[in-house]
Image (tube, rainbow, N blue to C red):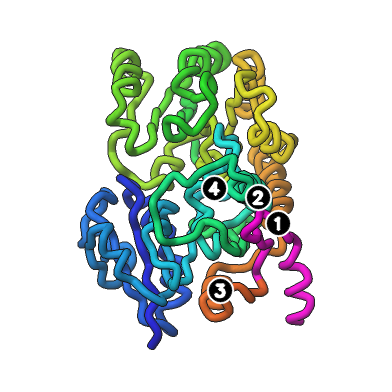
């Protein structure tokens, strides 16, 4: 059987990021010899990883990746590709189920440009990835941008953008699910994305007082669970904020390392600055999140594009007064209203996309000829989109 290497390398990514490999592994394990590798910094032990993935997992150092030649490699960390030889066909599983309002005008293309294929769900995410790759490669070609890394692998290559249904989400809800609420309680999850992702002044940490006070003024009995990004617990700035919040018994700091799904189950809603976890909360619970994207982002090309994409699809607040109004409305909405917005979002972002089992198997077999390509970005930044419709029609 042909080898396929699956790599887990997200720093302190825990179970949340390890699970991104599971759909690919399930799709391929009957037809390929799947070799799963993880580095020592993932925050998951070898035994835990083997239990989650239900297969052997080998722990290796980053230097091992440089020894791979002419292999198919799938990874959950965009950083990995720059370590790989040009002879490998490399597939990155992008994180999240929606685009994010990032400060980076290249939308992380400095890392993603080394991949042969990028797999993810959601039309908005692919639009932002494609835009970032296009601008990055154009600036590289013109000399306006130099490489961040020393590597033998080219970042000016053909990259296929491959679409599929969300990889970590259960089947779509067909009706509003039962939601057990405790009378007199309302739990708000605070989900800041990783430090440095948002524009200056736009992170949830920088606006934490305004966010909490706005919610409490509208729902006095609200309780909060703050879940910082895994690696941000090491930040002195985040540590200081956590210390300032510690005296309030109605604010809990999530240090459990539990999975995202366990966190979502505790919350009535989730407020985030940019994390795709806001949408993941909705997809897992059929309840609405709130995105807090303040005016500090005015005029930024990626943030503006994201706001244009998500306007009308997600509750978005740009200041405390708007947040207060939104949170009050969400708290009073019946389950059917949450369900209707959930349905509308899924229709616009995911309709027509295919199950991961189909997509990963064909991608490994057909590579750049996969009929599930949503688009292709060429070495010079030229973009060809809309391929999935033509390919699907031809296949039928």
Query: Could you tell which of marks 1 and 4 lies nearer the N-terminus?
Result: 4
Tell me, yes or no, whether the two marked residues, 3 and 1, touch with CB atoms within 8 Å.
no
Residues packed near mark 1 inside 10 Å, few (<14), some (14 to 19) or many (20 plus): some
At 56% from the left edge and 58% from the top edge, which residue is drawn?
156
Tell me, yes or no, whether the two marked residues, 2 and 4, touch with CB atoms within 8 Å.
no
The percent coordinates of residue 94 (x first, y second) are: 51, 54
The percent coordinates of residue 323 (x first, y second) are: 61, 20
Residue 229 tag number: none
Where disc 1 sits, the SS reads loop
Location of mark 1 (residue): 382
Where disc 2 sits, the SS reads helix
Residues packed near mark 3 inside 10 Å, few (<14), some (14 to 19) or many (20 plus): many
Query: Could you tell which of marks 2 and 3 lies nearer the N-terminus?
Result: 2
Location of mark 2 (residue): 134
Image: magenta residue range:
372-396
Q: From the viewer's perspective, is the residue at label 1 or at label 4 nearer?
A: 1
Query: Could you tell which of marks 2 and 4 lies nearer the N-terminus?
Result: 4
């Amino acid at each position: 059987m042909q080898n396929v290497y699956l790599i887990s390398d997200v720093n302190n990514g825990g179970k949340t990021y390890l699970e991104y490999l599971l759909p690919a592994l399930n799709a391929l394990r009957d037809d390929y010899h799947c070799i799963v590798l993880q580095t020592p910094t993932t925050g998951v032990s070898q035994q835990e990883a083997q239990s989650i993935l239900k297969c052997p997992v080998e722990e290796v150092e980053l230097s091992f990746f440089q020894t791979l030649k002419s292999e198919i490699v799938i990874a959950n960390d965009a950083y990995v590709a720059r370590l790989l030889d040009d002879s490998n066909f490399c597939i990155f599983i992008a994180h999240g189920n929606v685009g994010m309002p990032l400060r980076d005008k290249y939308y992380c293309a400095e890392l993603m440009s080394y991949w042969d294929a990028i797999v993810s769900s959601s039309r908005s995410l692919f639009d932002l990835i494609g835009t970032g790759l296009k601008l990055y490669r154009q600036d590289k070609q013109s000399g306006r941008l130099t490489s961040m890394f020393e590597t033998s692998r080219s970042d000016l290559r053909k990259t296929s953008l491959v679409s599929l249904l969300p990889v970590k989400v259960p089947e779509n809800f067909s009706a509003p699910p039962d939601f057990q609420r405790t009378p007199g309680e309302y739990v708000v999850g605070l989900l800041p994305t990783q430090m440095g992702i948002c524009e200056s002044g736009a992170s949830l940490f920088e606006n934490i007082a305004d966010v909490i006070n706005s919610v409490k003024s509208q729902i006095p009995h609200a309780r909060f669970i703050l879940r910082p990004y895994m690696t941000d617990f090491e930040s002195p700035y985040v540590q200081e904020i956590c210390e300032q919040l510690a005296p309030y018994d109605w604010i809990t700091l999530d240090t459990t390392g539990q999975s995202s799904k366990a966190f979502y189950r505790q919350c009535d809603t989730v407020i985030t600055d940019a994390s795709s976890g806001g949408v993941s909360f909705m997809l897992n619970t059929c309840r609405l999140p709130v995105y807090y994207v303040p005016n500090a982002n005015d005029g930024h090309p990626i943030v503006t594009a994201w706001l244009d994409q998500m306007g009308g699809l997600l509750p978005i607040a740009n200041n405390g007064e708007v947040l207060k109004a939104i949170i009050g409305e969400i708290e009073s909405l019946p389950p059917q209203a949450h369900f209707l917005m959930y349905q509308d979002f899924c229709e616009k972002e995911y309709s027509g996309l295919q199950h991961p089992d189909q997509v990963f198997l064909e991608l490994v077999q057909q590579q750049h000829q996969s009929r599930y390509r949503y688009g292709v970005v060429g070495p010079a930044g030229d973009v060809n989109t809309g391929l999935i419709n033509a390919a699907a029609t031809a296949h039928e």
